Image: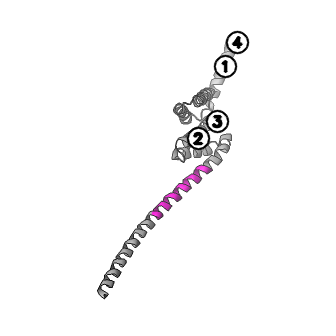
Amino acid sequence: MRIATLIICLAALLCAGCATMGSKEGSFLERYNGSRQLSQAETMLKEGDIHGAINALDTICNGPAVTGVTDEALFRLALLTLKAKPGSAQAQHLLKRLKKEYPASQWTALAAPVSEQVNALEEQRRQNKALKGNNQALSREITELNQRLEQLKNLDQELEKKAR
């Protein structure tokens, strides 16, 4: 009798796990594996293994979606990506994905000011690029004006010589 009850409970648990596969909650096994990988990534960060942590976080982000695990991994991976390359498109993509897939997450709330700063940095880069282009055009124009000025000076000197 106990074995039959145990088998029924086990079957119910297995069915419940399969029924939640489509949600962002993830199955118990997915949540456990994700949490374990997240802990490993945190340990790697503490030990200074940034590349290992990035790989572990990337694995979590590309795996099954698990609320509380994937959202944190997205946030941490975005920060590490920004540290390596400020304003990178990959970091922006991760922050957008976090906001889109986990709008109610605490990590999304923490990511909002980071995302604003990344966008501000990108806008400043665009402005700098435009200003550099304007600066180069003005430099060319100054060079041309200086050449014309020299030509006018030479003409003026020649006219003075002819007038004597």
Specify the amino acid type for callout 3.
Answer: Thr
Which of 40/8 is in front?
A: 40
Dot 1 crowding, Cα within 10 Å, few <14, some 14–19, many 20+:
few
Give whichever of discs 3 and 2 has the lower sequence position. Answer: 3
Q: Is residue 56 inside the magenta stretch?
A: no
Q: Position of residue 142 (x, y in %)?
A: 43, 69
Look at the image and tell me whether residue 103 can be seen: no
Q: Quadrant of the C terminus?
A: bottom left
Which of 141/15 is in front?
A: 141
Closer to the camera: disc 3 or disc 2? 2
Residue at 64 percent across and 44 percent down: it is 111
Distance between the Cα atoms at labels 3 and 2? 19 Å
Residue at 61 percent across and 45 percent down: it is 100
Which residue is tagged 2?
Answer: 79
Q: Position of residue 55 (x, y in %)?
A: 52, 33
Q: Where on the picture, by quarter, is residue 98?
A: top right
Residue situated furthest left in the rendering: 162
Distance between the Cα atoms at labels 3 and 4? 35 Å
Which residue is tagged 1?
Answer: 8
Could you tell whether 95 is left or right of 147 in the image?
A: right
Look at the image and tell me whether residue 150 can be seen: yes
Residue at 58 percent across and 30 percent down: it is 41
Which residue is tagged 4?
Answer: 2
Specify the amino acid type for callout 2.
Answer: Leu
Give whichever of discs 1 and 4 has the lower sequence position. Answer: 4
Residues rendered magenta in the picture:
116-135
Q: Is residue 131 inside the magenta stretch?
A: yes
Which element carries disc 1, helix, strand or loop? helix
Q: Position of residue 118 (x, y in %)?
A: 58, 49
Distance between the Cα atoms at labels 1 and 3? 28 Å
**Residue 67 badge:** 3
Which element carries disc 2, helix, strand or loop? helix
